[in-house]
Amino acid sequence: MKFKHTFHVFVDNFSVTYKHLLYRLVILLIAAGLYAAVLHPLIDKITGSAQWQSLIEGVKSFLKNLVQGHPTELGQATEQIKESFTALLTYISHNAGKVVWSIVGVIAVHLVEKFFSGLGNYAMAAVINDKMALRAQSPYLLTLIKNLKEACLYNLIYAPLSILYDFICYSCLGLLFFKAMSFLYFPFQIFLFVTLVVVAISFKMVFTTDWLPALIRGKKGQKKSFLYTFDRRRKNTFNVLSNFVVIILIIFAVNVGAVVFTFGAAALITVPSSYAILVCFEFVNYYDREELKYFIDKNTIIKPEKERTPTREEFFKGE
């Protein structure tokens, strides 16, 4: 039922997808400019080197001989490419300082991008919660401004933890499958890698799924919400994990299909929709477990089997 209710809530809140898309496009454009500024000196130095020019000439020669049907010349072009590539790697290693600073700059920009994207996710979550709880049509931008302090505090904690988790998981999986298990058939390596990436993302979602709902709907505050989301007692963790695995697999399939079959055009809708449906599931899961009533559309209210009477504190808070 959670999956069904999630889909209904997502459809009911679909309009927020367009607002979130616009916000993320602005963030993406700014981040792209910052990435370009950080990487341009290094790229300009590499592409201006003799080793790079030799590599490009080798590639051009290989393609020219391949098209013109000169197989005897292909071996010479291939050898030039190998030598030029090795020389280029040596040249890059001699400029290790600039490479390191470029990597640090990229990580810093990515952290800032993740932080500001997270502000948009927080605003979207608050808009969805308002509609689920009260049928309120909260403006996206005003909601973002109103919750800016809480959103900033949340993302100052969440963004670094998320990036660290992703880096550790993907690095370990990459080394495991493409280095330690390089003897496996390559398509099978890809299959196992993608499968474990889905599991890794699902585990992250499980242990952070209650964070936003506890903060926005539960009004528990930053510290209590943080502790609450990692406390998995009586939260039916396996059921939540299985739901996240299914949702993430669907998201992967839809986004890959959007890129392949529409040359990326549909991804403008599917990518922000992916964030929205994950947020919808988080709130549906929270509302169901906490036995709270919520709207899945303007005519349907989901009620728990036993309605919980709010405490005196919750009543005066308006929860």
Image (cartoon, helix red, strand yellow):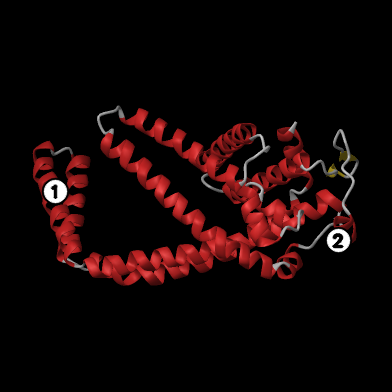
**Picture coordinates of residue 173, whole percent (x, y):** 37, 41
Report the quarter where the C terminus lies. Answer: bottom right
Is the residue marked by circle 2 packed among few (<14), some (14-19), or many (20+) residues within 10 Å? Answer: few
Q: Is residue 24 visible in this depiction of the protein?
A: no
- Residue drawn 13% across and 41% down? 74
* Closer to the camera in the image, 254 or 113: 113
- Residue drawn 74% across and 48% down? 14
The residue identified by callout 2 is 317
Tally of marks? 2
**Picture coordinates of residue 202, whole percent (x, y):** 55, 40
Above/below status of 219 relative to 81: below
Of the residues shown, which amino acid type is indicated by label 2? Lys
Q: Is residue 77 visible in this depiction of the protein?
A: yes
Location of residue 222 (image quadrant): bottom right
- Asked if the residue under mark 1 is in contact with the one under mark 2, i.e. CB atoms within 8 Å, the reply is no
**Picture coordinates of residue 109, whole percent (x, y):** 45, 67
> Which label belongs to residue 82?
1
Above/below status of 219 relative to 69: below
**Residue 42 falls left or right of residue 167:** left
